[in-house]
Amino acid sequence: MKTGIFLSLLGILMLTLWGRSKVFEKIGISRWKGWIPLYGGYLLYQKIWKPEMFFLALMGCCGRLMNWAFLGMAMFSDLSFLYDDISPESTVMMFTLTSLELIFFLAGLLVHLRAMKHLSACFCRGWGYAVGLTLLPPIFFPHLGLGFTQPAQHAASDSQGGA
């Protein structure tokens, strides 16, 4: 049972990366670079929008990990939680870090949504397709990469991809 779930998830990941590599080929980036997550993401942002925005989107993902680390340090620096006596200061600290995590996550999500809007605009698609690329990449990247739609000539050659 667990092996079947693992193989299904691995198949979905491979389908997504394959579709992404085909999208890379269509917009003029080497196809093999679509298989490398961080490097390929940076090149995609460089081609369709601004490369600096990739680091903002990445900060949204890494902000969650960073806040988990800070939350762990805050909890373990005060040993009173072992006795079920959580101080108000540690509660405020946990609320603050959780709020920061949510803000970083939402900011990264919005930056990524905007980048997917630029990618969908390259293929003459709208905001709905951008939302699909953001939330359901295993469906929308293969559809975009394996479909007959070609990128617009001006959008694929422009390194900024618009404003």
Image (cartoon, rainbow, N blue to C red):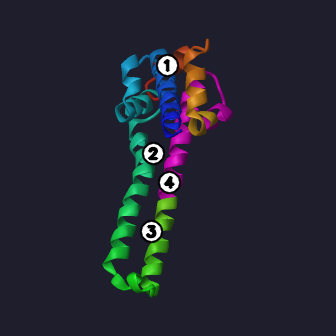
- What range of the chain is rendered magenta? 103-131
| Mark 1 or mark 3: whose residue is earlier in sequence | 3
Q: Which residue is mark 4?
A: 105
Residue 31 seen: yes
| Mark 1 or mark 2: whose residue is earlier in sequence | 2
Amino acid found under the numbered disc labelled 2: Ala
Q: Which residue is mark 3?
A: 97
Amino acid found under the numbered disc labelled 3: Leu
The location of residue 72, given as percent across then percent down, is 37, 68
* Label at residue 156: 1
Are dots 4 and 1 in contact, CB under 8 Å?
no
Q: Residue at point 47% right, 33% down?
A: 49
Residue 151 seen: no
* Residue at mark 4 to residue at mark 1: CA–CA distance: 29 Å
Q: Residue at point 43% right, 35% down?
A: 50
Residue 102 position (above or below residue 156): below
| Mark 4 or mark 2: whose residue is earlier in sequence | 2
